Image (cartoon, rainbow, N blue to C red):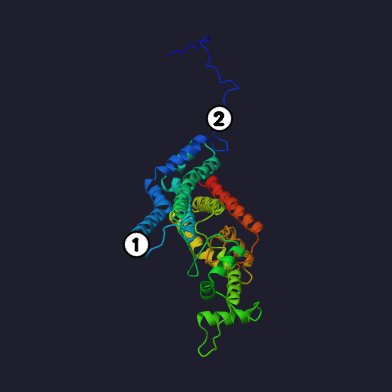
Amino acid sequence: MTTVIDVDAPVPALAPAGGPADHRGSWIPNGGMIATRILELRKRRGLMIALALVTIGIPTVFMVIRLLMHAFAPKTYGPAGGYDIYTNLVSGVLYVFGFIVAATLGATAGSSDLTDGMFRHLVVTGRSRLALYLARIPAGLAIIVPLVAAGFTLVCIVCVFAAPTRLEFNGVTVPANLSRPGLETWAAGHPNEVICQFGVRITPSTPDGSTIGNVTNSLCGGPPGAPVTQPPQAQITEVARLIAGMNYSDYSRHFLYPSNSLMIKSGLWLELEAAIGFIVGLGLGSLIGQRTVTVVLMIVLEIILTPIFSRAHIPHLLNLQRGVVGVAMAHLTPGGLPVIGGGGGGPGGGGPGGNPALIPETITVSVCVIVAWLVVWSALGAWRMVTRDA
C-alpha cells in the first residue's frame, strides 16, 4: 500500500501568540474557584444545619423561652432582653460557639478533599495547588461570617427592644445613665435606700468613715448593744451622697440595654474570633488531613487551654502564654463585656474597664499574636497542600 502525501492540503492554523493565556497555573484563585468551594461546602447539608443551629438556633431558643416566661409570669421572670442578657449571650455563647463552629467549618474545608477521595481529581485539572488552598479562605468566610452576624443581630434586637424599663442596682430601682452628680442628687432624695442597700466598705483611709458608720448603724441597725443616736437629716443626706459617689464606678457599668458603640465593637470582635477559628481550623485540617482530630484539638484550645493560660501566671512560661491566640483575643474584649473567667473587658492592666486577673499583655502584642497565628497556620496548611502526594 502506498501513502500519498498531499502537499497542497491546508495546514491547521496555530493559536495566535497573543491569544488568551492559560491561567490555570496562577496561585491567585479566581471567582469561579471560590464559588465552587462555596458550593461544595453548602452541599454538606448536615454541616450547614449544625452550624445554623448553633450560631442562630441556640440564641433563638433562649430568647423565645425568656419572652414566653416573661409574658406569662412578668412578676416572676424579668424581661427577655437588657444589658446583662446581652453580655452573657455574647461572651458566654456566641464567642465560644462561634469559634468552635468556625473551626469545624475550617477543618472540613481543609480535609474534605482527602476524605472524599477528590484530591487527585483536583490536581489533574492543572490548577495551582496554592490557588486551590487560598480559594477556601474567602469561601469559608462567606459562609461563617453571615451566620455569626445573623445570630448576633437577633441577640441585639431582642436585648434592645425587650430591655427592662427600670434599672435594678443593689436591689434598688435607680434611674439609668446618671452622671456622678446626678446619682448623688438622686441619693439625697432616697437616703434610707442608698445607705442601707448600697454597698460601702469603710477603711481607716475612707473620708468621713466614722460619720458614715454612725449614720449607717443608726438607720440600718448596728452591732447588738451599740448606742443608737438619731443623726440630723442634713448629715443623713450628706452620707447618702458620699455612699452614692463611692458606688458610682460600679453603677456606671450597669445599663438597661447595650449602647450602639458596644454592639458595633462586639460584632466586629465576634467576627474576628470566627475568622480566626476558621483560618486556623483550615490550616490545621489541611496539615493533619483529618477533620475529627482537628475539631477536637480546636475545642481543647478554646475550652481548656485558653482559660488556663489567660489567668494562670506560670513562671518561665509567661511569653508562651502570651502567644496563645485566645489570650490575645481576651485582651481585645470590648470594654463592658466580661472576659474569660469573669471581669470587665479590655487590657489586663487594671485600668478602667480592664481585667487585672488576665496575664499582662499590651494591645500591640495581642494584635501581633493574632496576625502571626493567621499567617503561620495559613502557610502550614498551604505548604501541606502543595507538597502532599496526589
Residue extending furthest toward the left: 72
Residue 285 appears in the rendering: yes
Residue 353 appears in the rendering: no
Relative to 281, does residue 322 appear above or below in the rendering?
below
Q: Quadrant of residue 65?
A: bottom left
Say what secondary structure mark 1 lies in: loop
Considering depth in this image, is 75 or 327 the residue closer to the camera? 75
Say what secondary structure mark 2 lies in: loop
Residue extending furthest toward the bottom: 225
Image coords of residue 76 (percent x, y): 37, 65
Mark closest to the chain's N terminus, 1 or 2: 2
Q: Residue at x 52, y 79 (%)?
A: 219
Crowd band around label 1 with a 10 angstrom C-alpha radius: few (<14), some (14–19), many (20+): few
Image coords of residue 190 (percent x, y): 53, 70
Q: Quadrant of residue 62?
A: bottom left
Relative to 112, does residue 353 appear above or below in the rendering?
below
Q: Which residue is mark 1?
A: 73
Crowd band around label 2 with a 10 angstrom C-alpha radius: few (<14), some (14–19), many (20+): few
Q: Residue at x 54, y 40 (%)?
A: 131
Asked whether disc 1 touches disc 2, contact meaning CB atoms under 8 Å apart, the reply is no
Query: Callout 2, which amino acid?
Result: Asp
Q: CA distance from mark 1 to mark 2?
A: 68 Å
Image coords of residue 304 (percent x, y): 49, 65
Query: Callout 1, which amino acid?
Result: Ala
Quadrant where the N terminus is found in the figure = top left
Considering depth in this image, is 326 or 58 the residue closer to the camera? 58
Which is in the foreground here, disc 1 or disc 2? 1
Mark drawn on residue 221: none
Q: Which residue is mark 2?
A: 22
